[in-house]
Amino acid sequence: MPLCMMTVTDKMTPVCRWLWLLLAGFALSAQASDVQREKRLADEIVDAILDGEPVWLNDGERDFLGIYTEADEARGGVIVLHGRGFHPDWSDAVNPLRVGLAERGWNTLSLQMPVLGKEAKYFDYVPILHEAFPRIEAGIDYLKQQGNKKIILIAHSCSFHMVNAWIKAGRLRDIDAFVGIGMGATDYQQKMVDTFQLHKLNMPVLDIYGADDYPAVHRLAPERWRAIRNNSKSRQIVAPNANHYFTDQGEALVEQVANWLDSL
């Protein structure tokens, strides 16, 4: 098998696994997200935003889109990160969260995460996970500039892998709670390159996933729970009737997340 085609599997020897990770690390400088697709996504949604206002943040290299939605009497700010290849007004999970949580008393900031082509898989995204780091930090800084004293971070699916890598890189800062939706999802025969970093979160964590979520998300649930259960306010919730994307379950997702935030 050519080295460039190697993928992480259970059958790999430790040496091969180490080599794959090393090559992935070298690829960081060679691969980049699809900036043109990201621009097309922004062009498609900016004029269609009904709730909230588009804001342009900078990640140190380029401007990227965010949507800021203010609550009437805000208790803090929530950053919402979409799943793989989507955008900050994605209808299935992100739009319900950014709008619904604003109605429940939280300013929300939904961010555009780095994207690749539509056919890209988990392993394709691994070399660009680091591109999300300055975007997460720009979102935190923006919420602080708007006067938000308490900041919650919510990440769905692939954005969780970005947050996980951000934590592993030692860049965790300035958030008071974390919500992970569908954590651990990858693609067929593709295992997570990094282990869960949830044990490093000295804060309440909500692990929420659908009853009809991907098998890997269910299989890894005990591992995630062991990592977060030391905080008495952490919870793990299986949402009935929900798939990985919470299709047609946006209101239920908002209710679960908002109720948990109320309990903190």
Image (cartoon, helix red, strand yellow):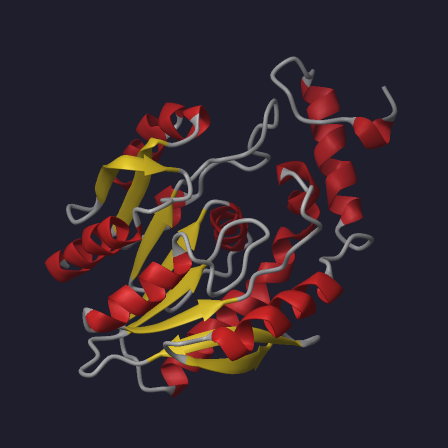
Closer to the camera, 15 or 157? 157
Whether residue 48 sits left or right of residue 70 in the image: it is: right
Q: Position of residue 225 (x, y in %)?
A: 29, 34
Whether residue 69 sits left or right of residue 90 in the image: it is: left
Whether residue 256 sits left or right of residue 208 in the image: it is: left
Identify the residue at image location x=59%, y=35%. Answer: 193
Closer to the camera, 103 or 80? 103
Identify the residue at image location x=40%, y=59%. Answer: 94
Closer to the camera, 201 or 216? 216
In the picture, the quarter occupied by the C terminus is bottom left
- Residue extending farthest right: 2
Q: Relative to residue 234, is residue 243 depicted above or below?
A: above
The answer to whether residue 227 is seen in the rendering is no
In the picture, the quarter occupied by the N terminus is top right
Q: Position of residue 141 (x, y in %)?
A: 45, 78
Q: Position of residue 183 (x, y in %)?
A: 42, 40
Q: Relative to residue 54, is residue 95 depicted above or below?
A: above
Identify the residue at image location x=42%, y=53%. Answer: 155
- Residue extending farthest top: 11
Q: Position of residue 217 (x, y in %)?
A: 41, 31
Question: Quarter of the image holding residue 62?
Answer: bottom right
The answer to whether residue 193 is seen in the rendering is yes
Q: Relative to residue 191, is residue 200 depicted above or below?
A: below
Question: Quarter of the image holding residue 63?
Answer: bottom right
Identify the residue at image location x=38%, y=48%. Answer: 200
Whether residue 38 sits left or right of residue 183 in the image: it is: right
* Number of dots carrying numbers: 0
